[in-house]
Every structure is written in structure tokens, then in C-alpha cells.
Image: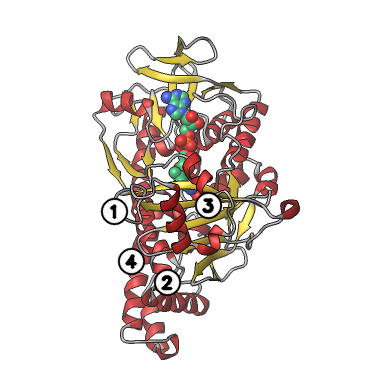
């Protein structure tokens, strides 16, 4: 016995089951297969490789280093690369013109737009190709009996019959409203705190130009920042862009509550985003066709139940999308869990316990940074204080690359622990605030003082 659980290895007392075949579940199944385990992956939706899950819409997201590293480690990046569109910076739209703010100094400092469905399909194909992962679709988990080690699913491919699946260990990768999490918390007393954001989102499409051409710059993440709300657009390989409007849920104006008629939608977009209106001929139809999504941070403690169950991805910790990190966080977590499991092959319970201890501080850190980044994206990118500090930060990074790195870059282009990024960024911000106090342009900055302050920072980790 060890720490209240019986020592066991994976698969020792029953099948290894992954619940949820999203990006994190399918990646984790690949890692487990690489360790030599047979895995059943049970997903509630039909097989997205054979069904049009998104009803013809291409929903995309930003893939960054923390997601790329596991894909590379599993030998998949060469297959993923052709479906990516690189984005080298933010294209900020205001007053009818657009200006690029590059993400970093290094030409490799790019993030990549990728279709959720295409990436997920590629991971499912790869998992299936191992010969060790059995993919089971249309199975929605209803209950996890951790005493008797049985999962109950509704089988949508068989008249919604209830199906029981015995397990030795279950990996809960079933997203933000995880069923596995409810069961885990029932036995370990874990907590789940949902912090809803008072802003929601709506996805829209900028169609391609002639012969699949891009009608705005393809290699950028477009932002229309408007202070209290914003619109963004990410490119797709077919020339279209997936745009997302982030807006307060309630309020007499400039809110989803206020945009209930075609006239209100036309007026709002015409006033706030006239250049966008020109790009989307079916704007009003598109607006009312799609759902309005809710956003929340879901902070959970208690990620595992002995060696029987563990939560990974959004099931473990849900963050708002403003740093483009939710999936990247989950993929990096799958990689960490793989490493820890390999370090404790005979004591899965210990591995799960260690996984939460090491990872939760990082999940908490990126959850906070994601909330923070919403303000930066919708207002900061046009705020004069922000802009001068950003310019100085880039200059200091140029002069002292071994000691200064922008927070955005540390999150997006390194695998440095998120919690360390927060600490480092806080100290750097203090330095930037001191150096820009009373300064109206970067030419007025005292660079001798800057060198002294920067020298007080510890060098950046070698592998960042
Ligand atoms: C508007 C928006 C934009 C985003 N942009 C980005 C971005 O740019 N970059 C980024 O890294 N992240 C982004 N994210 C976050 C990202 O989508 C999630 O973090 C990521 O999808 C989490 O992956 P997951 O596999 O853990 O969960 P999910 O993607 O939610 O997958 C869970 C899977 O489990 C299945 N499932 C659910 N319940 C059950 C059940 N009971 N039984 C069986 N199966 C079940 C679901 O069908 C699904 O396939 C964004 C999120 C939103 C809302």
C-alpha cells in the first residue's frame, strides 16, 4: 500500500479506457499506446472523420509550441504541418486601416491556425493506426462507478441502449462539463468552481475570394479591438477566415442581449466594424444561424481517484480562450502525464497524485493569464501606455535576449512552466513600469538604468 491506494500498474486490473476523443483524449490515447497499452477510446459524438460535425463551418484554433512539442514527439508534426496556416502577429484593425504587431523578434515566433476537426481527425487516424487503440463512437458516458469499476454509456448507434464497459483505469478527457469529473469528485471530495465570464462569443465566417484566395492578410491573427468587446479572425487553408465576436452577454447596447433583430445587428456591425461588413455578404444570416457560446473558467481540485481515474484537458481545468491556450495546455498536460506514468510504471496512483501536484499551479497560472489577455486584446493593443511598454520590452529583448522575454512569447513559444512565466513577467513589468514612468517615447528611456535593472533578473532557462 502507498498513500492510501493499492500499488498497481496500468492495465493490471482491467482495461484502460479514455472517455472523450477530442484533441486531448486522442493525443493521450496515442501516448498510452506508445507505452504499449491497449486503449478503448469512447467518444459521445459520431466519428467526425465520416460526419460533418460542424455543419459545414470550419472552426479553427491557434496551435502553439506547447501543442507542437507533443505532436513532434509522437512523430506527427510532419503530417500536421500541411494543414496549418502560420500567423506571425496581430493585425490590428482600427479607423479603417490595419497594422501588424509581430509576435516576437524571432522569425520562428509564429502561432498556427488549424481546423479543430482536421487536427482531431488526424489524431484519431494516428491513434487507430497504432493497432492498440479501439475507437468507439456515439457512446456518451452517463456514469462512472468507481467502486465496481464500470462505466455506463448511452449508445446512440443502438437506440440509445445503455452499455456497460468495465475498466481498470479511466482517463477523463470529456471536456469542461466532464461526467468523469463528477464521479471522481464524489469519491475524493474534490471541488469545482465555475467562474462564468459576463462576455459570450459568436462564430462567423469571412468567405474566400475568387479561386480560394484570401481577402485579407492570411498570415496574421486579425483583431478589431473596441475597448469593451472585440472581433477576431483566424485564417483557414481554403481562403476563408473563422471570425469570433466576443461581446458582453447583457446590456442595453453593444451586447448579445441587444442584438436580437437583423436591424440591430446591421447597425452594430456597420458602426463598429464597417471593413468587416464588406467581407461578409451574409452577415445577418450567419449571425442568427450560429449559437451564442458561453465562456467560463472552471477551476478544479481533486483530479484523480487513486489509480482508478484521472482528469486531463478541459475536464481537469477549463480556461477562457483569450490566450489561445486551452488545447495547448491540455496537450502539454498529456505529455507530462505520459512522462510521469513512465517514471512510476508500478504505481499509477502515485503518478496521478504527482501529476496534479505538478500541473495544477500551471493550469491556475494560465487560467489567470487568459483572463488578463482578454483585456490586453480588446483594449491594451491600442492603449498608449501598453504600446510604449511593448516597444520597450521588444527593445530590451533585443539587447538582453538571455534575460528578457515577453510574457506572450514565453506562453506561446516556449515550454517554460506557466507558473514561472507569471513570476518572471511580473518582475519584468515592474522594470518596464519604472523605466517608462513619465516617458512619452522610447527614445527618452534611460538605457543605462535599464541595463542595471535587467542584470538583477536571473538568466532565462536554457531550454525555453
Ligand atoms: C471560442 C473558443 C476558442 C478557442 N480557441 C483556442 C485556441 O485558439 N487555442 C487553444 O489551444 N485552445 C482554444 N480553445 C480551447 C480548446 O477548444 C479546448 O481547450 C480544447 O478543445 C480542450 O480539448 P479537450 O479534448 O480537453 O476537450 P474537448 O475539446 O471539449 O473534447 C472533449 C471530447 O469529449 C467528448 N465528450 C464530452 N462529454 C462526453 C461524455 N459524457 N462521454 C463521452 N464523450 C464525451 C466530446 O464530444 C469531445 O469530443 C478555444 C475554446 C473556445 C470556446
The extreme front residue here reads 263
- Distance from the alpha carbon under mark 4 to that under mark 3: 32 Å
Among the two numbered marks 2 and 3 on one chain, the one whose residue lies closer to the N terminus = 3
Q: Which residue is mark 2?
A: 382
Please provide percent x and percent y for residue 216: 63, 62
Q: Residue at x 41, y 38 (%)?
A: 314
**Nearer to me, 319 or 203:** 203
Say which element carries label 4: helix
- Distance from the alpha carbon under mark 2 to that under mark 4: 21 Å
- Are dots 2 and 4 in contact, CB under 8 Å? no
Query: Is 201 left, or right, of 79 in this rendering?
Result: left
- Distance from the alpha carbon under mark 1 to that under mark 4: 37 Å
Q: Mark 2: few, some, or many residues within 10 Å (few <14, many ≥20)?
A: some
Among the two numbered marks 2 and 1 on one chain, the one whose residue lies closer to the N terminus = 1
- Distance from the alpha carbon under mark 2 to that under mark 1: 25 Å
**Nearer to me, 14 or 263:** 263
Q: Which residue is mark 3?
A: 243
Amino acid at each position: 500500500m502507498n498513500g492510501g491506494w493499492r500499488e498497481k500498474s496500468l492495465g493490471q486490473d482491467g482495461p484502460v479506457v479514455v472517455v472523450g476523443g477530442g484533441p486531448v483524449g486522442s493525443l493521450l490515447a496515442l501516448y498510452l499506446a506508445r507505452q504499449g497499452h491497449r486503449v478503448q477510446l469512447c467518444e459521445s459524438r459520431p466519428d467526425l472523420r465520416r460526419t460533418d460535425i460542424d455543419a459545414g463551418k470550419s472552426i479553427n484554433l491557434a496551435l502553439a509550441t506547447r501543442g507542437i512539442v507533443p505532436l513532434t514527439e509522437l512523430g506527427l508534426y510532419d503530417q500536421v504541418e500541411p494543414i496549418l496556416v502560420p500567423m506571425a502577429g496581430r493585425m490590428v484593425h482600427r479607423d479603417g486601416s490595419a497594422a501588424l504587431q509581430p509576435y516576437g523578434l524571432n522569425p520562428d515566433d509564429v502561432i498556427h491556425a488549424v481546423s479543430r476537426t482536421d487536427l482531431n481527425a488526424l489524431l484519431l487516424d494516428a491513434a487507430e493506426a497504432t493497432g492498440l487503440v479501439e475507437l468507439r463512437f456515439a457512446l456518451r458516458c452517463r456514469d462512472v462507478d468507481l467502486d465496481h469499476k464500470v462505466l455506463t454509456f448511452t449508445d446512440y448507434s443502438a437506440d440509445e441502449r445503455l452499455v456497460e464497459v468495465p475498466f481498470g483505469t479511466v482517463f477523463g478527457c470529456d471536456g469542461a462539463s466532464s461526467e468523469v469529473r463528477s464521479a471522481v469528485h464524489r469519491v475524493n471530495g474534490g471541488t469545482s468552481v465555475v467562474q462564468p465570464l459576463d462576455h459570450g462569443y459568436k462564430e462567423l465566417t469571412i468567405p474566400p475570394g475568387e479561386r480560394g484566395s484570401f481577402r485579407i492578410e492570411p498570415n496574421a491573427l486579425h483583431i478589431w479591438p473596441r475597448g469593451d468587446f472585440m472581433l477576431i479572425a483566424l485564417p483557414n487553408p481554403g481562403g476563408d477566415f473563422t471570425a469570433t465576436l466576443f461581446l458582453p452577454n447583457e446590456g442595453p447596447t453593444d451586447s448579445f442581449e441587444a442584438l436580437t433583430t437583423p436591424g440591430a445587428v446591421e447597425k452594430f456591425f456597420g458602426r463598429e466594424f464597417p471593413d468587416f461588413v464588406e467581407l461578409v455578404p451574409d452577415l445577418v444570416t450567419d449571425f442568427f444561424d450560429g449559437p451564442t457560446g458561453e465562456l467560463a473558467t472552471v477551476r478544479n481540485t481533486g483530479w484523480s481517484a487513486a489509480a482508478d481515474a484521472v482528469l486531463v484537458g478541459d475536464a481537469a481545468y477549463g480556461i477562457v480562450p483569450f490566450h489561445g491556450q486551452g488545447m495547448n495546455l491540455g496537450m502539454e498536460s498529456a505529455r507530462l502525464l505520459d512522462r510521469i506514468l513512465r517514471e512510476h510504471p508500478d504505481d499509477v496512483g502515485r503518478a496521478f497524485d504527482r501529476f496534479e501536484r505538478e500541473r495544477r499551479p500551471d493550469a491556475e497560472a494560465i487560467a489567470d493569464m487568459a483572463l488578463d489577455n482578454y483585456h490586453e486584446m480588446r483594449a491594451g493593443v491600442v492603449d498608449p501606455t501598453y504600446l510604449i511598454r511593448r516597444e520597450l520590452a521588444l527593445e530590451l529583448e533585443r539587447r538582453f535576449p538571455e534575460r528578457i522575454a515577453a510574457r506572450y512569447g514565453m506562453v506561446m513559444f516556449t515550454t517554460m512552466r506557466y507558473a514561472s512565466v507569471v513570476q518572471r513577467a511580473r518582475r519584468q513589468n515592474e522594470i518596464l513600469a519604472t523605466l517608462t514612468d513619465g516617458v512619452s517615447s522610447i527614445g527618452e528611456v534611460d538605457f543605462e538604468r535599464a541595463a542595471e535593472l535587467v542584470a538583477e533578473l536571473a538568466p532565462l532557462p536554457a531550454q525555453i
